[in-house]
């Protein structure tokens, strides 16, 4: 299978692009002009046109006008001979009134249409503008959208951008009147409430400018908040279009595109089918050059508007963990067994292909994705596919039955829709058939089915065992299927999806000191996320966390101050002790010197006027200086 996928991706990479003629030279332009007008050689027409156009640009002003007749001749002749780019150039002449011709919208559109028919993307884009605005032809926004898509696929950045603008305009025009006054909507879109539909309605009001002053920047701010804060799918769709309609897709490395791409992928993941379609055709190498965006679009298109090619591509790519980049090299992506299985299962349900791959995935334990091996479900997939005539499924079914002993008990058929399976599994869990309900719910959670993730997390937290009981009624002690760990891992997954209640549960658990090993989110980050999502109780938890931090900080400051006080006291004590030691050393030195001089004698010293005073000195000093006066 891996080699098959690689071969498919390599084939896509090797698709040849049409050659582009080079310009004429001073020596060849005369012969190229002759080949154009006499032999109807449209390549020669283009070469001569390029040369003459460059010369005209160098000449400028009146001197440039002498090139107009030849330029018109080369362009019109080349267009008539099937050169798409020259048809576009003639269309631009008549649109702008340049090269010595008068403005003529009808002629301009005729040449743009011809350019589009011949495969020129910009011609399609210009034809789309004419249909969108009704320039000399009736308005047809549906056909304009088709032409923008075609032009984008033909590598016109303008077509991609104008297509995004039309999608945004269509959504805004179809929006119902404001459900509530602006002031109420603003209250509902505040940080403390974050109602997604209110943010969308506010953005539409400011974008249209009929009930409030028109402000497209403010409109985008409301849509961005509705997407990133309230995690509301329509807000993500509008936010992405608001960005991408103004960003040159040729500047793929610029930072301006990435917020739009992120919002577009979110909208697609949340089920906005138009977002998935736009991601696929405008995410290619000539536009955004983002293979991951294309993969996300094709995966979700498989789920929402199923076709065999998308489902097989998505399943193979997620299993291979490689995606083909525009440079023809395979780029690594995150291996995702859940999406791979779901894509293959969708292909099996709808087209009876990749059933063996989908069944084989069900035969493995995926403890990181919350699912135990489910032979019952694998056999059911193969059995249905076999009945539909898939010989490989028949053979694989016999092998699986021999390996596992066949179906044990009952199961919920994996070939019905995920929505139906969820409702049946939920009923089972609530009414005691935990084995069948748990088995199906685990696989729906592995697929990323949000409602199943919520149901399973709550069930584990309420006491449901992740594994079935052994024949004696006891449970296998499997550390990798610990109910608490799996429950909190699911809550963390849901928090990342923007489910406020799950974010609040994770934040509270982390605040209480639990450091789970399935994520690297700190308790401060978890609390901020819950606050960001507007979870009930998040503000109180945030205040408690800040109070706790303040108390901890105050205690640290007090400890530092006490340490400083003790340091100062120790320093003062050390200074007094140092002075005392110095005096003691001085006295000892003096005593030692006196002893060495014969000891000390004391007596009366006679001064002037028969004055006297008692003193002590060394014997040597007394005999030397005070012999007659001591």
Image (cartoon, grey):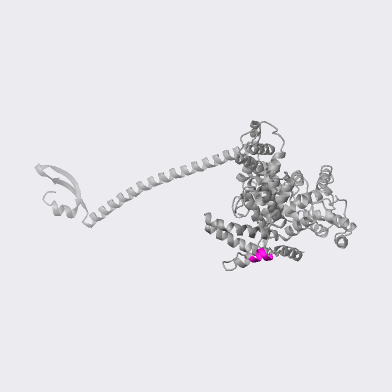
Q: Is residue 125 left or right of residue 610?
A: right
* Above or below: residue 165 compared with residue 121: above
- Of residues 82 and 382, the one nearer the viewer is 82
Does residue 50 belong to the magenta stretch? no
Residue 154, quarter of picture: bottom right
Q: Residue at x 31, y 51 (%)?
A: 582
Residue 214 appears at what percent x and percent y? 62, 37
Residue 517 appears at what percent x and percent y? 66, 52
* Above or below: residue 327 compared with residue 436: below
The stretch of residues the image draws in magenta is 34-39
Q: Residue furthest right?
A: 387
- Of residues 360 and 302, the one nearer the viewer is 302
Residue 513, quarter of picture: top right
Q: Is residue 564 left or right of residue 92?
A: left
Q: How many marks?
A: 0
Q: Is residue 477 left or right of residue 239?
A: right
Q: Is residue 287 visible?
A: no
Residue 361 appears at what percent x and percent y? 79, 58
Magenta-highlighted stretch: main secondary structure?
A: helix
- Of residues 480 and 89, the one nearer the viewer is 89
């Amino acid at each position: 299978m891996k080699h098959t996928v690689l071969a498919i991706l390599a084939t896509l990479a090797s698709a040849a692009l049409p050659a582009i003629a080079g310009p004429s030279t001073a020596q060849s332009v005369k012969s190229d002009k002759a080949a154009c007008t006499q032999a109807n050689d449209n390549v020669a027409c283009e070469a001569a046109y390029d040369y003459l156009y460059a010369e005209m640009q160098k000449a400028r002003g009146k001197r440039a006008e002498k090139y107009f007749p030849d330029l018109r001749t080369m362009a019109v002749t080349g267009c008539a001979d099937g050169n798409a780019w020259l048809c576009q150039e003639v269309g631009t002449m008549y649109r702008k009134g340049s090269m010595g011709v008068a403005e003529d919208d009808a002629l301009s559109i005729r040449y743009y249409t011809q350019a589009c028919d011949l495969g020129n993307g910009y011609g399609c884009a210009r034809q789309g503008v004419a249909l969108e605005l009704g320039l000399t032809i009736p308005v047809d926004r549906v056909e304009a959208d088709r032409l923008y898509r075609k032009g984008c696929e033909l590598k016109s950045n303008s077509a991609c951008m104008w297509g995004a603008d039309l999608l945004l305009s269509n959504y805004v025009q179809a929006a119902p009147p404001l459900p509530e006054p602006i002031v109420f909507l603003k209250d509902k879109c505040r940080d403390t409430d974050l109602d997604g539909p209110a943010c969308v309605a506010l953005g539409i009001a400011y974008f249209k400018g009929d009930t409030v002053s028109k402000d497209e920047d403010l409109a985008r701010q409301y849509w961005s908040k509705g997407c990133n804060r309230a995690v509301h799918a329509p807000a993500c769709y509008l936010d992405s279009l608001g960005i991408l309609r103004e960003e040159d897709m040729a500047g793929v490395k610029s930072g301006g595109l990435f917020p739009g791409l992120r919002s577009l992928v979110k909208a697609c993941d949340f089920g906005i089918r138009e977002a998935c379609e736009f991601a696929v055709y405008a995410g290619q190498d000539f536009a955004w050059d983002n293979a991951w965006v294309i993969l996300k679009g094709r995966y979700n298109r498989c789920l929402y508007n199923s076709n065999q090619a998308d489902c097989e591509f998505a399943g193979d790519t997620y299993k291979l963990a490689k995606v083909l980049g525009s440079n023809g090299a395979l780029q690594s992506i995150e291996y995702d067994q859940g999406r791979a299985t779901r894509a293959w299962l969708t292909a099996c349900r709808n087209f009876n292909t990749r059933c063996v791959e989908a069944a084989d995935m069900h035969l493995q334990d995926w403890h990181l994705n919350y699912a135990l091996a489910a032979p019952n479900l694998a056999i059911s997939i193969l059995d249905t596919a076999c009945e539909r005539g898939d010989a490989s499924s028949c053979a694989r079914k016999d092998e699986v039955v021999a390996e596992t002993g066949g179906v044990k008990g009952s199961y919920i058929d994996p070939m019905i829709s995920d929505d139906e399976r969820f409702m049946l599994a939920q009923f089972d869990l609530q009414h005691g058939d935990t084995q069948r309900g748990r088995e199906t719910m685990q696989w729906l959670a592995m697929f990323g089915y949000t409602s199943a993730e919520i149901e399973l997390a709550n069930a584990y937290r309420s006491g449901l065992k992740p594994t079935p009981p052994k024949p004696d009624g006891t449970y296998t002690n499997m550390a990798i299927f610990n109910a608490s760990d799996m429950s909190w891992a699911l809550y963390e997954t849901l928090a990342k999806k923007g489910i406020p209640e799950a974010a609040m549960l994770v934040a509270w658990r982390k605040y209480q000191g639990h450091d789970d090993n399935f994520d690297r989110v700190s308790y401060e980050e978890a609390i901020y996320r819950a606050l960001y999502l507007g979870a009930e109780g998040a503000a109180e938890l945030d205040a408690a966390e800040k109070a706790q931090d303040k108390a901890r900080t105050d205690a640290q400051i007090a400890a530092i101050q006490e340490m400083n006080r003790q340091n100062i006291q120790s320093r003062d004590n050390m200074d007094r002790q140092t002075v005392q030691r110095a005096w003691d050393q001085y006295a000892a030195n003096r005593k030692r010197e006196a002893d060495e001089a014969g000891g000390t004698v004391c007596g009366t010293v006679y001064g002037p006027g028969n004055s006297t005073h008692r003193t002590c000195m060394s014997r040597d000093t007394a005999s030397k200086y005070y012999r007659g006066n001591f």
